[in-house]
Amino acid sequence: MTALLTILKHGPLMTVQDGGRYAYRSRGVSTSGAVDRGAHAIGNALVGNDPEAAAIEFALMGGSFSADRDVLVAITGGACTVEIDGKPVTTWESHVLGVGETLSVGEMQGSVWGYIAISGGITIAPVLGSRSTHLRTGVGGLDGGALAAGDTLPIGAPTDLSPRMLGTPYLRRSGPIQIVPGPQDDYFDENAWRAFLTKPFTVTQSRDRMAMVLDGPKTEAFKGHDIVSDATVLGSIQVPGSGKLIVLTADGQTTGGYPKIATVTSSDLTRLAQMPAGSRFMFRSISADMAEELFLGSQQRLAAVIGDLRKTR
């Protein structure tokens, strides 16, 4: 008989997400998957799952949950208050959630996206090779929508209920958010580029899994703010007529008709997406080759963290 996880109370934008839906962008299907792929992978590893397994993602506030069998749970993504039957437990570490007990996950502190990984993973039927939810199109997840109180999710059989903790800290780099210019970098003159790279931007509250809007110097495209619609990628920075930058994230559309001044590097996109509203930062331009080296380095650091997990008992 399939075991079930029940959602007793839900937070904003709570969805099922796995490692993402690949090989379909050319057909107009967004990648989706976890916004913070590193935190998602570590959460899964802490409960003994494959790093790509399906887990619960939420924004800002968690909720409460119960399971009809003993499971391991881990909360990652940032710092927040977590309790099992009223007893505080730590984030970035796995814990046994027993039958009849309630897991309570509070408000994120200093970050936006949190993850609840459950041993055995969430085993809803995949769509186009992924269990990830794309809310705008209703693809994947639980009936294509956000999770709510009263929903139940099937979970797989765990292989080991031994709690684990990090042996190597998972550290994010600091400093400017790094970008690679283009593909329409020539739509912007020297003055626009100077402002883009020397003045601060602020994260606004206008954000979801699809994109985030930034406040800052108005960015003018002297060639105009409309282009023949072309491909976008995760991290594309679109510049509409308002001059306010739009950064595409996990559920970002696959094409767009605004010029793209630059692309946030893969190694820094998560850091930007996790910045709470009101956060200020600067951009820094680097080469595509350097961006690739930084991405490979970030993947090596993530693998080292997962490879150094330790059992707590």
Image (spheres, rainbow, N blue to C red):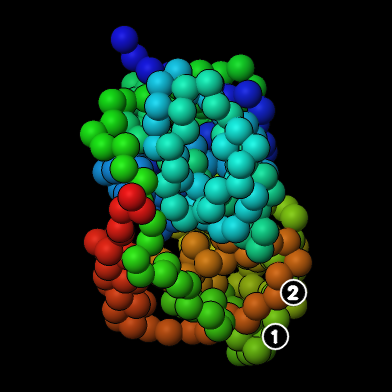
Residue at image position (32%, 71%) is 301
Residue at image position (69%, 49%) is 107
Q: Which mark is residue 241?
A: none
| Circles 2 and 1: CB atoms closer than 8 Å | yes
- The residue under label 1 is which amino acid type? Lys
Q: Residues within 10 Å of mark 1 (few under 14, many from 20)?
A: few
Q: Quadrant of residue 258?
A: bottom right
- Split into 4 quadrants, where in the image is the N terminus? top left
The local secondary structure at tag 1 comes to loop
- Nearer to us in this view, 193 or 80: 80
Q: Which mark is residue 216?
A: 2
The local secondary structure at tag 2 comes to loop
- Seen as rendered, the residue at the extreme front is 313
Q: Which mark is residue 199?
A: 1
- The residue under label 2 is which amino acid type? Gly
- Nearer to us in this view, 310 or 175: 310
**Percent position (x, y) of residue 115?**
50, 46
Q: Quadrant of residue 248?
A: bottom right
Residue at image position (70%, 65%) is 203
Q: Is residue 151 left or right of residue 300?
A: right
**Percent position (x, y) of residue 283?**
58, 80
| Figure check: 96 above or below 222 | above
| Figure check: 1 above or below 272 | above
Q: Is residue 26 left or right of residue 206?
A: left
Q: Is residue 107 visible?
A: yes
